[in-house]
Image (cartoon, rainbow, N blue to C red):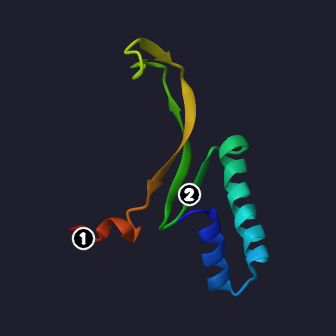
């Protein structure tokens, strides 16, 4: 699902126009992003999961095009840990 599909689904479930749903979705995503970047760097939603900022230390890698060893700088990234109550992992896959 992409952002457009998310907005359309939100509009259908809430009986809002697509424009109003887009404002709501964009506002929510903006709040999440602001908290991760400038707030306490964590957002927990009970029964869904937790978004958090994770530090990745510097490490050695290999340039796949040349085979040359390179240094990958330390950086922060956004991670997500699903709640144990989130049902998507209980489905059987064939």
Which sits earlier in the primary sequence, circle 1 or circle 2? Answer: 2
Position above or below: 60 against 78: above
Dot 1 falls on a residue whose secondary structure is loop
> Nearest the camera: 67 or 87?
67
Picture coordinates of residue 15, whole percent (x, y): 70, 87
**Which residue is located at x 65 percent, y 46 percent?**
36
Which quarter of the figure has residue 41? top right
Q: Quadrant of the C terminus?
A: bottom left
Local crowd size for mark 2, using a 10 Å CA cut-off: few (<14), some (14–19), many (≥20): some
Picture coordinates of residue 12, whole percent (x, y): 64, 84
Q: Which residue is mark 1?
A: 92
Relative horizontal placement of residue 36, taking residue 24 as reference (left or right): left
Q: CA distance from mark 1 to mark 2?
A: 27 Å
**Which residue is located at x 54 percent, y 20 percent?**
73
**Which residue is located at x 38 percent, y 63 percent?**
84
Picture coordinates of residue 6, whole percent (x, y): 61, 69
Dot 2 falls on a residue whose secondary structure is strand
Name the residue at the bottom extreme.
15
Which quarter of the figure has residue 44? bottom right
């Amino acid at each position: 699902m992409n952002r457009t599909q998310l907005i359309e689904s939100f509009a259908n479930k809430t009986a809002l126009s697509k424009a109003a749903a887009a404002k709501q979705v964009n506002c929510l995503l903006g709040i999440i992003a602001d908290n991760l970047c400038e707030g306490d760097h964590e957002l927990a939603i009970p029964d869904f999961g937790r978004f958090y900022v994770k530090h990745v230390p510097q490490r050695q890698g290999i340039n796949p095009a040349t085979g040359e060893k390179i240094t990958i700088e330390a950086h922060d990234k956004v991670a997500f840990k699903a709640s144990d109550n989130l049902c998507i992992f209980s489905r059987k896959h064939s």
